[in-house]
Image: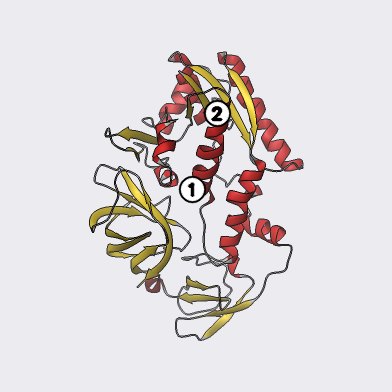
Amino acid sequence: MKIAVAMSGGIDSTVAAVLLKEMGHEITGITARFLPHNGINDEIYNRSVIDAKQVADQFGFRHIEIPLIDIFEESVVKPFCGEYFSGRTPNPCIICNRYVKFGKLLEAAKDAGSEKLATGHYVIKKSDGIRHYLSMSPDPSKDQSYFLYMLTQEQLADIIFPIGDFTKEKIRDIAAEKNIILKDKPDSQEICFIPADDYISFLENRSGGKPVPGDIVDSTGKILGRHNGIYRYTIGQRRGMGISAPHPLYVTGIDAAGNRIIAGPREELYVRYLETENSFDMKEVIVDERIASVKCRSTQRPVPCRVKRDGETFFVTFDKPEAGISPGQSAVFYDESGDVLGGGIIARTII
């Protein structure tokens, strides 16, 4: 089979490509350029390309480059900035996966002659003969199913996840056993388009304006202090508010319309319900109320809930109140087997 492998220059996609090559498939490594040309971006991208090409040379397969700068800017970067300036906390990787990596990059792979696109994601792909769906990785610390819930049935049909059954430790072992050139390369955990993970500086440079100060208030509206831009705060944040109080204070809400940050004790973080503003289906189409588990952050373990749907909105009731849930993040639903049922972007929470 002709398979394109999205190669970032990291160890996971590298091992995915090598394993598929050794299975006898005709492999084309693809490195996509997402970021515009400048000194830092060029240096990072060139390093990724060099590393990917070295592996392609070592194991004897083709490597090509694909420019996706414009679609990445319009589909990922601009919405990311807009969400933060609206007082929400977005997850750009989820949007990128649907519209760029498994959208335009998949199209580019097919245009280049490949039948399928493979990546180094830690997730298991399954099919019941009717629907394709994803399941959690056996390595909970690396599981990426949360970031892929928006993928369509058409996209899933043409995607392969060769390392989904492996742990990170196993991937490192494979790289060492096969003496892959990049076997000792460290992982990268940062958002790819934000240098040094400094999203505040990134947002300010993008906006070209000055932060708009406003009030920090408690749940009754009493003014506690001042903030220097609502995009500097996320739900659950404790540090950096500059407020003296007899007990710890957390960001419990962001009022973008009023340009206010709401702060309070930890118990005010807990919510019992949430609503999404849209719905994406994977293993099944949720309609009637269903018992499930839900992740509202990528690093969270799924927690029990009940979910039902009305049009394009999911309504979620937690079995026990949950803290630190931020509009703009995603609620992703799982069944008892760890299979992804579907999900949506969190619109609002209710105590």
Which residue extends farthest right? 39
Which quadrant: the C terminus?
Answer: bottom left
Q: Nearer the viewer, residue 18 or 72?
A: 72
The image quadrant of residue 86 is bottom right
Quarter occupied by residue 171: top left
Q: Which numbered circle lies on residue 109?
A: 2
Is 144 left or right of 79, judged from the image as shown? Answer: left
Which residue occupies 58% across, 76% down?
A: 259
For this rendering, which residue is in front, 2 or 268?
2
- Residue 301 is marked as none
Q: Earlier in the sequence, mark 2 or mark 1?
A: 1
Amino acid bearing label 2: Ala
Judged left or right of residue 30, residue 305 is left
Residue 235: image x %, image y %? Answer: 48, 66
Q: Quadrant of the N terminus?
A: top left
Q: Mark 2, residues whose alpha carbon is within 10 Å: few (<14), some, or many (≥20)?
A: many
Which residue in the structure is indicated by mark 1?
94
- From the top left corner, tell me how far across and down residue 248 is, in percent: 46, 73
Q: Is residue 274 above or below residue 339?
A: below
In the structure shown, which secondary structural element does the residue marked by tag 2 occupy?
helix
The image shows residue 323 at horizontal and vertical percentages of 38, 65
Q: Is residue 195 above or below residue 23?
A: below
